[in-house]
Amino acid sequence: MKRVYLDRIAATPLHPEALAAMLPFLKESFGNPQSLHRDGQAVLEATEEARERVAALIGASAPEIVFTASGSEANNLALKGLALASRAKGTHLVVSAVEHLSVLNAVKGLEKFGFSATVVPVDGEGLVDPAAVEKVLTPRTTVVSVMLANSEVGTIEPVAEIAALCKGRNVLVHTDAVAAAGSLPVDVRALGVDALSLAGDQFYGPKGAAALFLRKGTRVLPLIDGGVQEGGRRGGTENVAGIVGFGRAAEIARAELAGRAARAAALRDRLIDGVLGTYGHVILTGPRARRLPHHASFCIRFVEGEALLLSLDMKGISVSSGSACSSKSLKASHVLLAMGLDHELAQGSLVFSLLADTTAEDIDYVIASLGPIIDRLRAMSPTYTTFLKESLP
Amino acid sequence: MKRVYLDRIAATPLHPEALAAMLPFLKESFGNPQSLHRDGQAVLEATEEARERVAALIGASAPEIVFTASGSEANNLALKGLALASRAKGTHLVVSAVEHLSVLNAVKGLEKFGFSATVVPVDGEGLVDPAAVEKVLTPRTTVVSVMLANSEVGTIEPVAEIAALCKGRNVLVHTDAVAAAGSLPVDVRALGVDALSLAGDQFYGPKGAAALFLRKGTRVLPLIDGGVQEGGRRGGTENVAGIVGFGRAAEIARAELAGRAARAAALRDRLIDGVLGTYGHVILTGPRARRLPHHASFCIRFVEGEALLLSLDMKGISVSSGSACSSKSLKASHVLLAMGLDHELAQGSLVFSLLADTTAEDIDYVIASLGPIIDRLRAMSPTYTTFLKESLP
């Protein structure tokens, strides 16, 4: 059976060149980079080269990169580490309503320890209004965290504008760029942020290797205390092979970013046009244009995303319904609810995220497969039957 | 040049069968285990099989295993996660003086937030006295953490006895078994502990995959908040390949543990006898018998461990001077100082840790190489010159 993988937001395949870069560190070069002998030093060179490459992808300098094991860890280190290090100044945080659960739940964790947070709303396209962020800043606000792009609805947020408003107010700005980095041009200086999370597994690097950019001079309390690794900002033996693969993936992403994005955007638009033009009671979630180039998301009324997802899987098509991290909780997405969608519509969420090798043929196969599935699921849906009865004259 | 790697405490090579188990998850099986489609589900099966294997190595059940990215992360999750979850009961912790920096520094981190800790001393061999632990328990003590074996001096601690004394007092017992698991038989039920840290890269698994055992029903606050991964105890996309390799390494270690240990212990004793019998002003650190089977550690008076290590490296021999995590801090080891060694002697620390394929020939090469190095370094040492002058009639 034909397999079409359109779930890049959940996982990308590992780039063969990233794997090739990793293999020596899974074989003969097994040293610990903290060891002073040559087995350690050879490995250290490789992790530091990877640090340069990851830094280059986002316009940072290498010492500003703290390697972590996941985007979620980077987000937790940012939120908790910055908030705890700044607690002498204040205990108020600001986040948007559409942040990833690792940001929202890190904030909930902090609330148990005397911190408070204001959650800034979004509009119907998932966009944060920079003025709304500015309005809630207080003299005790220490950290603002607004994501660069949303993995569920694709929305690209006005992070540079938000950072500009925070400048001069002694407020640290973090952005979760896990969904954006490697797919959109990202420059930490142009954004004006103090901290930025990214993850290699979102752009053909290995799982288990991610990073937090921390602007030089930014104080952070480690989540993981230990030895001298990562400049004392994150203890634990480094995942050397993962870091090396992450670095190579960052290097490739930097070189291929523009081409990949243009190609993906054309296919994304083909998918959006195809779905919206072919099927009724379907809405696009997130903006039409201001969205991730590889990302198309919909809500399909009268069906459940879960059932859609499993039915598409039977046709060989892998997609998400909301974020992978919350896929098993079976709750309506907090992102869609924050955008004002009703619960029922939010249940019918479907997220297509395209790989670099996705073809027009794949897209057409998906569009064609979707119709019979929607029809069959709607035929079984009591709410659809009710709707039809009520609509009939 | 001959290369002899005797720095297992810093890093082990990856077992070829562990690598073989990992490769499919670095190639075609790239899904996210949280995805509901078949790309995700196939991967989920593999991580859950790995969880069974890791659990089996330590006599635990699979749901009691929380995968982490390092032993340090597991230790931090144990100390911070248990202490924070138990803070309604109390804020007093007990650790030994020879714990790994990830434990000691996690405790220091907690002390900034109202927790207090008692550090229990050790004897000249690095042993913790269970009665000394019992003596410092208070009604507000919530967590006791004593390691199972020390990576710098090899000492095996009486953890079962300590856990037995804590039983019935509503005190959680954690043990850092990073240096022990995979090398010594470890059974969480026999030990009677509530939490135990282990790391695959200590027994031929990949770097970046480790675990915390948490006895069923043990409450923990996550370090990394996020999605539903690891039963809500640790957010972040799973390092699938790493976890699979860790599982395979655990399975192999379980099968080969007894044979490896017997073989290593014989070579270890050959090394200890050879070094102590050949060179003067050398002491064994840690106990003669109650130590890790692959571990021989010494302090060599009148020379610096750093210089010894680099000189041995020139002869193709890789060893540690203290723990890898603190190797670059150039401080005398807190472990050796806690054992009562003076600063000068503690500076001459040398740790040999044997691999499964270390040979008697390797050991003899090390013993023979050590002599000229010690002689040369001592000839350059002002303290040795002073000593000689004072010793002469």
Image (cartoon, coloured by chain):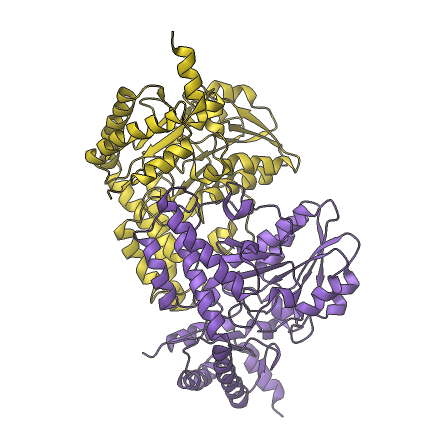
Chain colours: A purple, B yellow
Question: In the rendered image, is residue A8 in sight?
Answer: no
**Quarter residue B176 falls in:** top left
Seen from this angle, which residue lies furthest top?
B393
Quarter in which the N terminus of chain A is drawn: bottom left
Q: Is residue A116 left or right of residue A78?
A: right
Q: How many marks?
A: 0
Task: State the image coordinates of residue B292 (x, y, percent, origin top left).
Answer: 33, 30
Q: Is residue A347 left or right of residue A307?
A: right
Task: State the image coordinates of residue B126 (x, y, percent, origin top left).
Answer: 43, 23
**Quarter residue A302 falls in:** bottom right
Q: Residue at coordinates 38% horizontally, 10% vertically from top-left?
A: B392
Quarter in which the C terminus of chain A is drawn: bottom right
Foreground pick, B198 / B320: B320
Q: Residue at coordinates 53% horizontally, 59% vertically from top-left?
A: A71
Task: State the image coordinates of residue B53 (x, y, percent, origin top left).
Answer: 33, 47
**Quarter residue B10 falls in:** top left
Task: State the image coordinates of residue A10 (x, y, percent, origin top left).
Answer: 47, 66
Question: In the rendered image, is residue A122 in sight?
Answer: yes
Q: Is residue A377 left or right of residue B58?
A: right
Foreground pick, B228 / B121: B121
